[in-house]
Image (cartoon, grey):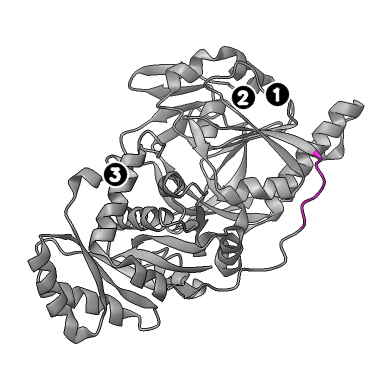
């Protein structure tokens, strides 16, 4: 594929709106647009999918390294790759390195960067900002700059004249359009659906971009991206069924994680903890992240399904929102809502973030996920706090953030495991294989009526 990266000088500059507008504009010209998102974000990819009709894939240098990024790149396909950056173009996991940044990924992909700059209230100073970003790292492939939130045609003329001596191409200017904003997205509360991002708004985003940017020029200057990583294992024959939660309360999954389960031999079966009264026939359960606290009353009322979760004897894995649903209760301002009770304790909602950022996990004991010492990476973002966890409940994980002391969590009882860490299995491809193997052992144990060594904890 050819492609480019849409990056920003900082968060909130409008790069998501610009990226979506470009995706919409090229899509309606008949191109198959493959979207990507740099960083661990779950929400922006849902907007990408609504606009392009294709699943968006995360590219994260800290989580998976270069090989994992190129593997994720190769899992996509299409005529044109549009990659949305994260935060500011140089922002990443560390203030003195490019690890985890948009700039790092652009270099790995060989993809030129379209730098979105908020020019509201600026004139010649915009040239200083653009030049600063261009010269900070001369190795960063810069295609040019797009000025967002301009005051009109005359404002764009002034900005273009100011930037001319720097030699940085001005790719266009976009006027203020409050009606095109993505309200609430920054709060982590809005997942895109065709109703929240309807076709008329998508068309307006495309119109906005086409009126302010020469998209044919962008297409002509898109670069051939790096050759994807080779050697992906052939899918194993189906050996088990894994039911995974998928509805308004549970939907945070990396596409690669689900694909890796299938490649390891699992048949994936979606179910809704909100709407289904019973679990599907399965050898393992996967509860991804999401917003169970928003739907706590409805979820709590589904006592039949929660009871089946509590009594399910095979492997269960819950991440963040999934962990919350596996606990005794979720406590919000509206009250206490009983949950599955497969893991003891309560998830209490707080007004401030309890954890945010990258995390590296080491397994403290042997189990269904592999031997002690197994390491993988992920990230945390949650407002709830796990309280009332008994001391005797096993903590399988030692979790290290980029700053601060390590903590122990990864709460395990029998074959049920829950954690606040959103794992990316590209950081350790052995993990999904181990989970599928555990589910397969349980399937054999159930079929034959003979306990297997793998089932011991």
Q: Earlier in the sequence, mark 3 or mark 1?
A: 3
Which circle, 1 or 2, is nearer the viewer? 1
Q: Position of residue 198 (x, y in %)?
A: 35, 38
N-terminal of the two: label 1 or label 2?
1
Which residue was labeled with disc 3?
Answer: 182
In the rendered image, residue 261 lying in the magenta stretch gets the answer no
Report the front residue among 166 and 175.
175
Can you say whether 48 is above or below 133 in the image? above
Label 3: few (<14), some (14–19) or many (≥20) C-alpha neighbours in 10 Å: some
The tag earlier along the polypeptide, 3 or 2, is 3
Name the residue: 74% across, 34% down. Answer: 241
Distance in Å between CA atoms under marks 3 and 1: 40 Å
The overriding secondary structure of the stretch rendered in magenta is loop
Query: Is residue 141 or residue 315 the one in the foreground?
Result: 141
Identify the magenta region: 234-239
Which is more toward the observer, 68 or 228? 228
Residue carrying label 2:
342
- Marks counted in the figure total 3
CA gap, disc 1 and disc 2: 9 Å
Measured from the top left, where is residue 410 in percent x and y? Answer: 59, 41
Residue shown at 36% from the left, 64% from the top: 6
Label number found at residue 312: 1
Quadrant housing residue 125: bottom left
Give the residue drawn at x 57%, y 21%: 340
Residue 395 found in image quarter: top right
Asked whether the beta carbons under mark 1 and mark 2 sit within 8 Å of each other, the answer is yes
User: How far is the residue under mark 3 from the one under mark 2?
Assistant: 37 Å
Q: Closer to us: mark 3 or mark 1?
A: 3
Q: Is residue 235 magenta?
A: yes
Q: Nearer the viewer, mark 3 or mark 2?
A: 3
* Res. 154 image quadrant: bottom left
């Amino acid at each position: 594929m050819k492609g480019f990266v849409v990056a920003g000088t900082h968060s909130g500059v409008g790069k998501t709106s610009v990226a979506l507008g470009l995706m919409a504009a090229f899509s309606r010209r008949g191109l198959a647009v493959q979207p990507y998102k740099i960083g661990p974000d779950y929400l922006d990819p849902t907007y990408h999918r609504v606009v392009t009709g294709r699943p968006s894939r995360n590219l994260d240098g800290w989580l998976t390294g270069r090989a994992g990024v190129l593997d994720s790149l190769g899992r996509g396909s299409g005529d044109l790759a549009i990659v949305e950056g994260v935060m500011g173009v140089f922002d990443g996991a560390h203030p003195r390195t490019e690890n985890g940044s948009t700039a790092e990924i652009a270099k790995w992909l060989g993809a030129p960067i379209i730098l979105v700059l908020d020019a509201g209230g600026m004139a010649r100073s915009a040239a200083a900002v653009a030049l600063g970003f261009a010269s900070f790292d001369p190795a960063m492939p810069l295609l040019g700059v797009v000025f967002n939130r301009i005051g009109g045609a005359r404002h764009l003329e002034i900005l273009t004249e100011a930037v001319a001596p720097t030699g940085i191409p001005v790719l266009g200017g976009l006027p203020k359009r409050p009606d095109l904003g993505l309200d609430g997205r920054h709060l982590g509360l809005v997942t895109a659906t065709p109703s929240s991002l309807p076709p008329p708004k998508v068309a307006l985003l495309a119109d906005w971009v086409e009126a302010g940017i020469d998209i044919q020029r962008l297409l002509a200057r898109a670069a051939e991206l790096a050759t994807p990583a080779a050697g992906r294992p052939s899918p194993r024959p189906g050996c088990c069924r894994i039911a995974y939660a998928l509805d308004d309360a549970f939907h945070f999954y990396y596409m690669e994680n689900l694909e890796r389960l299938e490649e390891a031999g699992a048949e994936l079966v979606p179910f809704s903890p909100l709407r289904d009264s019973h679990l599907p026939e399965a050898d393992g359960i996967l509860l991804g992240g999401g917003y169970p606290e928003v739907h706590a009353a409805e979820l709590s009322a589904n006592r039949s399904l929660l009871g089946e979760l509590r009594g399910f004897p095979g492997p269960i894995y819950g991440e963040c929102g999934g962990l919350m649903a596996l606990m005794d209760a979720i406590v919000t301002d509206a009250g206490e809502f009983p949950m599955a009770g497969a893991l003891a304790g309560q998830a209490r909602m707080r007004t401030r973030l309890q954890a945010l950022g990258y995390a590296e996990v080491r397994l403290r004991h042997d189990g269904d996920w592999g031997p002690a010492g197994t390491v993988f990476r992920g990230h945390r973002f949650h407002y709830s706090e796990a309280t009332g966890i008994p001391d005797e409940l096993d903590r399988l994980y030692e979790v290290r953030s980029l700053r601060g002391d390590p903590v122990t969590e990864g709460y395990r009882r029998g074959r049920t495991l829950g954690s606040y860490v959103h794992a990316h299995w590209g950081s350790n491809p052995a993990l999904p294989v181990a989970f599928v193997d555990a589910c397969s052992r349980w399937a054999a144990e159930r079929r034959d009526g003979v306990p297997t060594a793998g089932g011991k904890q």
